[in-house]
Image (cartoon, helix red, strand yellow):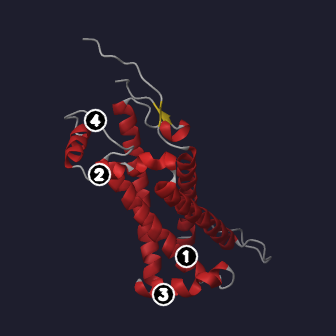
Amino acid sequence: MKEDNKRIAEYEFSIGLRLTHWIRAISIAILIVSGFYLAYVFVSPVITSEPVNFMNAKWRAVHQIVGFVLIGCFIFKFYLFLFDKKSKIERVSVKDSINPKIWIDQVKYYLFLGKHPHLSGVYNPLQFVSYLFFYIVLFVICLTGLILYVHVYHEGLGGLLYDPMRVVEVWMGGLANVRLIHHIAMWIIMIFVVAHVYMAIFNAIKGKDGAMDAIISGYKFPKEH
C-alpha cells in the first residue's frame, strides 16, 4: 500500500516564542564570548600611554548590556508560558511529560525501535525536561550575574538590588562561590546548546515534518491523518 505523503501546515510557535528564542540564542552567544574574555583575557590592546583603550571596560559593558537583555527575555518567556493563549500548547506538554507510556515510546523512537508517539503538546517528555533544566540553569546564571553586577555598580539599579543580592550571595557561600557557580552554569548552557542543535537536526531529518522550520516561520508540516 502506497504511503500517503500529503502534509498540512500546522501553526506551532507564536511570534513571541520565536522572538524570545532567537534573542536568547544571540544573547547567549555574545555572553559566552565576552564572558570568556572577562575571565581569561585573550586579546590585548596596543600599548599606548594615552588612556583611550579601555578594552576590558568595553567587553564588560557589552556583557552587562546583553546580560540584561537576556534577563528581560527570560522574564518575558516566563510570562508567555504562563499566560499567553498561543503558548497553551507548551503548557499542555506538562501532561505528556508525566505519561510513562509516552516516555517509553519516545525513547524507542530515538533508538529507531518505534514510531514517534502522539503528543498533546508541542514538546516530547525528553524535550520538556531538558528545557525545564535549561531554564533553571538560565535563572541561576542570571541571578549570579546580578550579584556580580551589584559589586561594580552601587547606584541606580545596582543600588536597588544591592541588599537582596548580598543576601543571596551569602546563601551561595560568598562572592568566590558566586563567580564559580556563574562559570559552571555557563558551561552547562554551552553543553545544552550543542545537544539542543544536534537533537533539533536529528528530529528534523528523522521526522521530516519541518520541525526546524517552525522556529523560524512558526509552521511545521506533519503528515495529514
Callouts 1 and 2 close, C-beta under 8 Å: no
CA separation in Å, label 1 and label 2: 32 Å
CA separation in Å, label 3 and label 4: 47 Å
Quarter in which the C terminus is drawn: top left
Q: Element at badge 3?
A: helix
CA separation in Å, label 3 and label 2: 35 Å
Find residue 56 and report its image quarter: bottom right
Q: Element at badge 4?
A: loop
Sequence-earlier tag: 3 or 4 = 4
CA separation in Å, label 3 and label 1: 12 Å
Which residue is labeled 4 in the image? 116
Q: Is there any visible trace of residue 203 in the rendered image?
A: yes
Dot 1: few (<14), some (14–19), or many (≥20) neighbours within 10 Å?
some
Callouts 3 and 4 close, C-beta under 8 Å: no
Find residue 30 and report its image quarter: bottom right
Image position of 88 (left or right of 203) = right
The label nearer to you, 2 versus 4, is: 2
> Foreground: 192 or 124?
124
Residue plotted at (22% across, 41% down)? 105
The label nearer to you, 3 versus 1, is: 3
Dot 4: few (<14), some (14–19), or many (≥20) neighbours within 10 Å?
some
Quarter in which the N terminus is drawn: top left
Dot 3: few (<14), some (14–19), or many (≥20) neighbours within 10 Å?
few
Which residue is labeled 1 in the image? 146
What's the amino acid at mark 2? Ser
What's the amino acid at mark 3? Val
